[in-house]
Image (cartoon, rainbow, N blue to C red):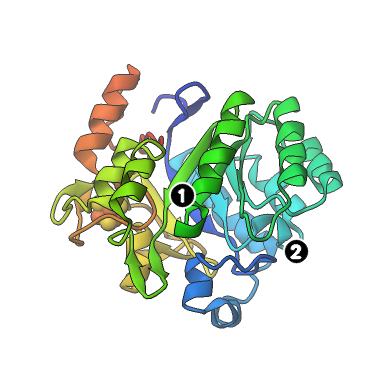
Amino acid sequence: MAAARWDHSRRMWQGASFTWDLWYGCDYHCPYCWFEMDPVWDLLAKEHEGIPIERWLQAWRRIGERHGTASIDVVGGEPLRYPGVLDLLGGLAQWHRLEVVTNLSVPLEFLEDLTARVSPERMHLSGSFHHESADWEDFLRKIVFLKSRGYEPEVAMVAWPPHMGLIQEKKAILGRMHIPASILVFQGVFQGRDYPRSYTDAEREQLGGLVSPREREYRMHERRTLARPCGAGHVHAHVRANGDVLRCGKDSQYSRRMGNLLEADFALHSSPQPCPYPYCNACGEHVYLWEDWTKKAASTGWPLVEDSGSHHAAARSD
Ligand code: SF4
């Protein structure tokens, strides 16, 4: 297998990738958060009691031995509020590349500790800005700090209907600072209306210029995916806070699992499998649809690696 590597300019990773719900604790209560809308935070926190850091490190080391260096999106809840997270991320960075998605509510001193332990070659941070809970100036200060340390931070915001004007304004500010910002389509219910179906024409037009074409195609316009071969489960998987592994975020809506990361024999599928769902509108994982993925991999000029049964090649991008 070609050495897994990260290309900052194209934001693509060659190697297996995982999205990991480290835990279900968060210090914010955003009205558009899936867990708030349902509301299931307490239930999830009880069902997924903390797993000792040593067990996680053992499991991720095994993944490294079986599938090579992976890119792990560490999400939550708020991952940087997880007890002992500095030891956990410092340990993981021995084998894997980390993509931490954080609301940046931790103090600046905490970020100084984190960046002293894990270098930009091994970690990338995305700040999710939440208008109702966070202070914009404080958030920006932390983004600027991370940029000055070489972490190339990005910012994500949710296109919740009452925030449409604000996100456009903030995205323009970030653009002037050369900080990439991505806008996530809101999925859920607002004022009794189901989104994204209920965006008005004006909002759709506004979003058209803010979200990526793929995001529009699969999440807003719900392009069909049923039976199309998909690399989710083969080159990418979603890990829950109890170690259960799902092919993708959509599996969590249907309570399907492909194994548990903490089991010694867990491995990714050895080939792409048909998508079992009509739409891929959960977590932007449509990038793993095999036809698109192979085109994307080919466009990088990197060799496509044949599956040897133990190693995979994957590419990811927004
Ligand atoms: S197309 Fe989307 S919903 Fe279907 S398996 Fe792939 S990631 Fe999951």
Estimate the x, y position of residue 288 in percent, counting from the top left.
Answer: 30, 43
Judging from the image, what secondary structure is the residue with disc 2 in? loop
Up/down of 59 relative to 287, above or below? below
Tell me which corner region of the image, top left, top right, bottom left or bottom right, holds residue 280: bottom left
| Residue 83's disc number | 2
In which of the image's four quarters is ligand 1 placed? bottom left
Estimate the x, y position of residue 47 in percent, counting from the top left.
Answer: 55, 81
On the image, numbered disc 1 is attached to which residue?
18
Q: Residue most toward the front?
A: 202
Q: From this viewpoint, is residue 151 visible?
A: yes
Badge 2 density bin: few <14, some 14–19, many ≥20, Cα 10 Å: few
Amino acid beneath label 1: Phe
Up/down of 63 relative to 197, above or below? above
Position of the C terminus, as image quadrant, is top left
Estimate the x, y position of residue 277 in percent, counting from the top left.
Answer: 20, 61
Q: From this viewpoint, is residue 70 visible?
A: no
Position of the N terminus, as image quadrant, is top left
In the image, what residue occupies the spot 44% across and 49% down? 184
In the image, what residue occupies the spot 83% across and 43% down? 113
Estimate the x, y position of residue 135 in percent, counting from the top left.
Answer: 73, 51
In the image, what residue occupies the spot 55% across and 67% down? 241
Q: How far apart are marks 2 and 1 (CA)?
A: 21 Å
